[in-house]
Image (cartoon, coloured by chain):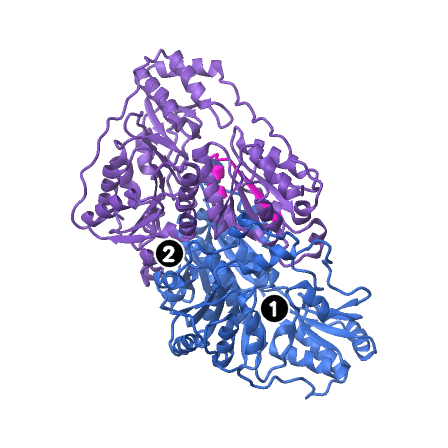
Chain colours: A purple, B blue
Amino acid sequence: MNGAQALIRTLVDAGVDVCFMNPGTSEMHFVAALDDVPEMRGVLALFEGVATGAADGYARMADRPAATLLHLGPGLGNGLANLHNARKGHTPVVNIVGDHATYHKQYDAQLESDIETVARNVSSWIRTSGATDKVAADAAEAVAVASGPPAQIATLILPADVSWTEGAEPSPPIAAAEPTAVDADAVAAIAAVLQGDEPAALFVGGRACRADALADASRIANATGSKLLAETFPARLERGAGRAPVDRLAYLAEFAAMQLDGLQHLVLVDSKAPVSFFAYPGKASDLVPEGCTVHVLAAADGDPAAALAALAIAVDAPADAATIQAEARPALPTGPLTADGVCQALGALMPEGAIVSDEGNTSGLFATGHTAGAPAHDWLCLTGGAIGQGLPVAVGAAVACPDRQVIALESDGSALYTIQSLWTMAREGLDVVTILFNNSSYAVLNMELSRVGATPGGPKAKEMLDLTRPDMDFVSLATGLGVPATRATTGEEFVAQLQAALATSGPSFIEAIVPSII
Amino acid sequence: MNGAQALIRTLVDAGVDVCFMNPGTSEMHFVAALDDVPEMRGVLALFEGVATGAADGYARMADRPAATLLHLGPGLGNGLANLHNARKGHTPVVNIVGDHATYHKQYDAQLESDIETVARNVSSWIRTSGATDKVAADAAEAVAVASGPPAQIATLILPADVSWTEGAEPSPPIAAAEPTAVDADAVAAIAAVLQGDEPAALFVGGRACRADALADASRIANATGSKLLAETFPARLERGAGRAPVDRLAYLAEFAAMQLDGLQHLVLVDSKAPVSFFAYPGKASDLVPEGCTVHVLAAADGDPAAALAALAIAVDAPADAATIQAEARPALPTGPLTADGVCQALGALMPEGAIVSDEGNTSGLFATGHTAGAPAHDWLCLTGGAIGQGLPVAVGAAVACPDRQVIALESDGSALYTIQSLWTMAREGLDVVTILFNNSSYAVLNMELSRVGATPGGPKAKEMLDLTRPDMDFVSLATGLGVPATRATTGEEFVAQLQAALATSGPSFIEAIVPSII
């Protein structure tokens, strides 16, 4: 078999059987080899940021990496923003980036670039596969490294001749690394701190935001009178009725500071010590209160669920001590539609097992509250702050979980970065309902303009944050990309459209016309 | 004044008075400062690849750089593909990339990344401006470096606190570098070669594709019996009736080899020795025929027009020896629409002074022939091979030349990478007619699949190159982004729609439904 065939076979044998791709000429042998390894599913994206974001969403839900197939340095460049998000969320991704044939690189052809440099900022592991008889072993190593722990991004650069030359053999999977063992001394020390009199909080992130780990965290917090907080943007938060609820740290540093105020101990569980999202003149970047000691129960290379279980034993937390969220649904909205009303309807109608990809930004702020008591569901956040993630993550989540309802909460400003995602939803028949908050502005930036002390913005500045002139028609955009779409301006319309969309399989799109909350 | 104000004032004083931007929080002081420096025009893009591609198109037409304003590493990442194209085309661009405040970087906030690394592959010059009193001088240097010769990409990283701190002063412009002087010995040697008996060709690129330089090149070729060829994808080719015509080297290596067959001397004029775009199994990468000697008349840091003028004198080329293209218009197309028919209509109707941004790919192959005798116009090509360039370049060209008709030749596959460009055309009221060839496939990849020897593609491979299921509706897409759009399926419809679009100011969009030529 040729290098491409051995590579794909190796990926599949290692559990990587989905590849989100936007290929070009240098990847044609990889594409041709898809027919030789039927277990590999190829999913076409029309823009690379869709492919990388979909790989992120897939791995969050499948707990194993997907592959991407990208075309040379520029294709990887187009995928960087969502790889940044995956990196920050500790989500595994295996990138395959095609390159010119090894002997062709010396000629500096038009598409020649330094792919390793382009890959460096987002990738923990980078290798240019130099020979056909090595590519399968390189792929096995890429999957193992990506899988972690810590989960990370591995980028394998595949020269065209390495791909097309015969003489390759598949490589067996490499066992994933063992997580760093739970540190009994740390558990004991943290137990003593939590059982003491000084105000303390557990600060959970990453894999500590899954239901079982959260239940243990809640038991510990309740048994010791500690606070329980989650990071601002978890990659995947399991929540809803029947699960242990957790408040996320606020995006705005002013509010986050209130949540952390007075703490003398902060226990990190697969999270990092909280810092302000951006710097603001005269305001602190480090949100850990002065005098507060930071403890690490489990890091990204550890086993946060096991560490929390051990800590629960150490503090003698009763088995039934966890807070359990009761089922509670808000009333259906009526009258002129607002962002609040959209989130009410979502909370009222969301089915059990839903997966919400949340890039609602300012308009989506109400969603957390209104869905807290909805049936058990998963909430996927904007891990790295690079907008244009929500729709691709929804694509990937839907590929990973074909039997679950995916809901993408999107905003007008963010949607436009990777709007091409809708086409992939249509092609693959993915059961995704996209709810688009159209408030006609980069609302978050209008807020930030004043928060950074740059007010009052003059007319030229305001124009750079305004999305009117022309108003975008998202129903036309979605329709043009093959997704049935409707527009709602009242609560009643929105409810009817959401009910219809949830009752339909395949993608739907609802444009919710709402005033900006800023 | 603060750093941002001094920076913008310095840019304007150095002749950089347009900034294509997609800002975020860390760039808010730059945005606010737009109102303090009224000469700077801010043009909002909804995706960074639009901003960088527009800066490329602007500089090709204005012959001076525009600035971009991008948000941290992910924003720069989204702009990389079109910066790659600009780099390969030797087009100047000044990137301003906002970063976290200097003291904030240590906290590894969500959007933290190594921006210098992200910038490296595309930038000849990178600097992180470390202090408010240095940022203006840094900006002046960035403009000078970008302007060249050789023109290149300069990336200035602007920490938020450097931007917002008071105490900055503008810096005066720095004089651009002088081009390397014409080498009299090289001119004499090349003159002797061209006047000898061995088959020779002038191979022009870059600034040697402007009308005056081409006229001299044509005089030289005719006076010495040499061939005249241009690079495959010039950044800006001045052509049409009344100008000296030049054949471009074919994209397909098989055809390029025929054009170069038998040459014993190849004279490079602001071009590089021709190589195959991609490698193909068993085919040569280097297209220079065996035994052919390559001579350099002018390189990217030289003055190709002056070198050609000197060479014309050295070979005693008569003043009237240039070939002059006669005006000739094709007949208007009738019946079912084809890619050929679209290009006929373009050749028949294109106004004098038109600027064509050509990303028509396979469908656009006919355009060169049918427009050869149209009134004088400029032709802007896909310099670096990274698709998604055509629409942004049209945006930039229209901003640079508000009195000229811009025409974007686009294809369905390529258009989707940077479709957000249409919104900027609408917002700025740019006089751009976009002609979209919709053949429902990545046709060039269907061709490449067989050219790389990977045929026969199986059903899974073919699906990755197919753009149906769902068919895209580009009229809906354009309308959704605020650009009036029509669809043509016959020659008569297309002609009527193109006439209407050319008669209207502001953007228009025509979706031409055509069969694939592959």
Tag 1: residue type? Answer: Pro
Asked if residue B141 shows in the view, the reply is no
Left or right, B155 with respect to A189, comes to right
Mark 2 burial class by Cα count in 10 Å: few <14, some 14-19, many 20+: many
Tag 2: residue type? Answer: Ala
Residue A511 percent across, percent down from the top left: 29, 52
Q: Quadrant of residue B362?
A: bottom right
Residue drawn at (29%, 30%) of the image: A240
Residue B148 vs residue A6, the one in the foreground: A6
Residue drawn at (63%, 56%) of the image: B450
Write down the chain letter for disc 1: B
- Which quadrant of the figure contains the N terminus of chain B? bottom left
Residue A320 percent across, percent down from the top left: 30, 15
Where A92 falls versus A97 (above or below)?
above
Left or right, B115 with respect to A100, comes to left
Magenta residue span: A83-98
Q: Using the image, tell me which numbered label, if any, was put on residue A497.
A: none
Mark 1 burial class by Cα count in 10 Å: few <14, some 14-19, many 20+: many
Describe the element under mark 2 as helix, strand or loop: helix
Q: CA distance from mark 2 to mark 1?
A: 38 Å
Left or right, A406 with respect to B160, comes to left
Q: Using the image, tell me which numbered label, if any, was put on residue B32.
A: 2
Describe the element under mark 1 as helix, strand or loop: loop
Asked if the residue under mark 1 is in contact with the one under mark 2, i.e. CB atoms within 8 Å, the reply is no
Q: Which residue in the structure is indicated by mark 1?
A: B234
